[in-house]
Image: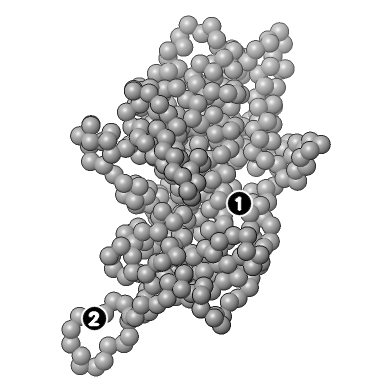
Amino acid sequence: MDPLSQIILSFLTPFATLFSKPSWKKALTLLLGTILCTGKRTVCSALRAMGLANEKGFSKYHHLLNRACWSTLQASKILFFMILPFASGPIVLLIDETLERRKGQNIKAKGFYRDAVRSSKSQVVKTSGLKWLVMAMSIKLPFISRAVALPFLSVLEPSKKSNDRDGKRHKTTLKWTIQMAHQIRRWVGRTREMILVGDGGFAVGLLALKCISLSVTLVSRLKMNAALFDFPPERAPGKKGRIPLKGRRLHNFKEMLLLPNLPWEEIMITGYNGVMKTVRFLSTTCIWGADGVIPIPIRWVLVVDPTGQMDPVPLMSTDPLMSPKQIIELFVARWGIEVTFEETREHLGVETQRQWSDKAIARCTPILMALYSLICLMGHRLNQEGAVQAESSAWYQKEDPAFSDILRIVRKIIWRENLISRKGKITPSLENISPEILNWTESIVVFLLQAA
């Protein structure tokens, strides 16, 4: 087998432990077909890409998604430990919601949500679809200048109307986030430092308290009118009564911007795409009184763009010892998950699935999100072999390879292994896949689960 093909398969075979041997052959066929095909990512499209358009037992491939017994949570655990070695320092977890636009009476978990892409400050557009809560790990690959967000855990959030109809208790995004943080902490134990980064929707007092109890640092964006308080004064000797939890109220961020002679500082940070940028900031520690919960000590950072192109951004961290530069750069890296959402839609066909079964719906989008991470990991290994190069054009010169370049070389390797090396074959049918691929799991020791 070609060495580059072995690299690609080495990232797929750990998941064989989730399936029986016949099911794994079908799963591998669908995975390779999903990578090869363009347009809609349906089971039929994947089979066509693998030359199985005339496969009479095509329904068995559908059964793999809508009725076969395998765990998406266990698959997320395997993928998590595949990404973990790339996190040399603290484990930086990015979390955000994304909307998968779907219609149809048979899609039970759908609801009507604000479409962030189509909405603006002056107009709110609501769309029917599925809401996904995605957790990704932010890592730095040597051949890409920016930090990339590799999703490993995707959770479907059924709408409240759907839960009420099914007689289930509705779980909010906050509760799902807390459950996911508990799950990751169980996987890695208490020894590794973890940082959870989210946008302003995750600046919630209850989530901050849960993160503190789990030894997880929460970094998020605050509101401009956030309630900030001084630390409580020392209690006088002999004084009775309840111990105060916070001191006097401080100026909020809107008021700070109007105050003269503030001690602004300038610092160079790593901005988007690895470009160095100068920003001005204020920072100190205080007590954050959020949502009526126990007041929380935080470090806040008010960031201002000297050029005036961006609005002031207030940030916070539940670790008062974290430096302002680290807080700013962590929040900048959060944009990587937005890039991931866009690239999975453009190149991996998220929102083009057509499954109606509840189980298939809950599995397809996490699979496509996981494929994004796997292809990026393949690109890192292929880059070490000198196989990944940025494809430029007369109107667009790229210095770093993009996800489309990695996907292109992975497709070429799969096609070369299944087409050119098979004499007399013109389509990558199931028979063209070498026996080494189908029986790969028998010679691989999956140490990832053991490490967990």
**Nearer-N-terminus badge (1/2):** 1
Residue furthest front as drawn: 122
How packed mark 2 is, by other alpha carbons closer than 10 Å (few <14, some 14-19, many 20 or more), is: few
Where disc 2 sits, the SS reads: loop
Residue 243 image label: 2
Front residue of 11/216: it is 216
Residue 395 in view of the camera: yes
Residue 209 in view of the camera: no
Residue 291 image label: none
In which image quadrant can residue 435 be found?
A: top right
Query: Left or right: where does residue 243 sit relative to residue 251?
Result: left
Q: Is residue 113 above or below residue 234?
A: above
Where disc 1 sits, the SS reads: loop
The location of residue 291, given as percent across then percent down, is: 30, 62
Q: Which residue appears at 59% of the width and 32% of the height? A: 347
The location of residue 277, given as percent across then percent down, is: 67, 63
